[in-house]
């Protein structure tokens, strides 16, 4: 049947996005926390693997560049964007340390780490959450499935109710745009 694939994907996506309503309070809390950190001049660090790395990079570029409105650049750092650092750390300390080691070098108390992970089980994400705790960095995790081990390590976890990585990442993109909307409102009035 023509269009069946599209309709099926659309319905699944809509259902996953609708399920976020159940976490409205937690999502609003995360958005307010990130916005307040930005207003204090803190840095937002982000990380993820694969497709989640693109979400992490997307968040950082929206902060440093702009989302919709012209405003001053804001401190956002994607821990997956520095290829020489990634290869050096991966080679010398192991792939599981690629984000944690950067956080230990760069993060200050009061900064925020936003992890994107569809499983919540990646060793480098878990190590980043541990490093963030060590540096007194607020830990936010945008997760999927059941949240994995990352859920318990985060100060604030938003878990997208799906086992489909594509749907989880679509919801994560929606959430990062919602975060950017609030930050921009805070800085542009």
Image (cartoon, rainbow, N blue to C red):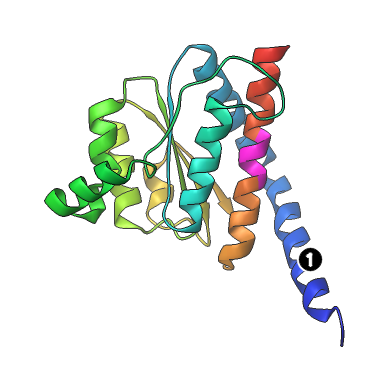
State the residue lying farthest toward the bottom.
Answer: 1
Residue 2 found in image quarter: bottom right
| Residue 158 shows in this picture | yes
104 shown above or below 70: below
Residue 170 found in image quarter: bottom right
| Residue 25 shows in this picture | no
Quadrant of the rendering where the C terminus is positioned = top right
Q: Residue sitting at 47 percent across and 55 percent down?
A: 147
Question: x%, y% of residue 159?
Answer: 55, 51
Q: Residue sitting at 49 percent across and 43 percent down?
A: 56
Question: x%, y% of residue 86?
Answer: 27, 47
Q: Nearer the viewer, residue 105 or 35?
A: 105
178 shown above or below 126: above
Q: Nearer the viewer, residue 152 or 73?
A: 73
Question: x%, y% of residue 77?
Answer: 42, 32
Question: x%, y% of residue 11?
Answer: 80, 67
Q: In the figure, is residue 143 to the left or right of 47?
A: right
Q: In the rendered structure, does residue 141 fall within the stretch colored magenta?
A: no
Residue at image mark 1? 10
Q: In the figure, is residue 98 to the left or right of 149?
A: left
State the residue lying farthest toward the right.
Answer: 2
Q: Nearer the viewer, residue 64 or 119?
A: 64
Q: Main secondary structure of the magenta part?
A: helix
Q: Residue sitting at 83 percent across and 80 percent down?
A: 4
Q: In the rendered structure, does residue 176 fall within the stretch colored magenta?
A: yes
Which region of the structure is painted magenta?
A: 174-178
């Amino acid at each position: 049947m023509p269009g069946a694939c599209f309709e099926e994907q659309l319905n699944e996506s809509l259902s996953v996005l609708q399920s976020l309503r159940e976490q409205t309070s937690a999502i609003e809390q995360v958005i307010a926390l990130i916005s307040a950190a930005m207003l204090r001049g803190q840095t937002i660090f982000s990380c993820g693997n694969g497709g989640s790395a693109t979400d992490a990079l997307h968040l950082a570029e929206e902060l440093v560049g702009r989302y919709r409105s012209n405003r001053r650049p804001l401190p956002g750092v994607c821990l997956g964007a520095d290829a020489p650092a990634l290869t050096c750390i991966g080679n010398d300390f192991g792939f599981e340390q690629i984000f944690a080691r950067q956080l230990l070098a760069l993060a200050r108390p009061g900064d925020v780490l936003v992890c994107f992970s569809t499983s919540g089980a990646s060793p480098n994400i878990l190590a980043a959450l541990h490093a963030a705790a060590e540096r007194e960095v607020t830990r936010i995790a945008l997760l999927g499935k059941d949240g994995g081990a990352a859920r318990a390590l985060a100060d604030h976890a938003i878990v997208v109710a799906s086992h489909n990585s594509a749907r989880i990442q679509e919801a994560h993109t929606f959430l990062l745009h919602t975060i950017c909307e609030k930050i921009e409102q805070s800085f542009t009035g």
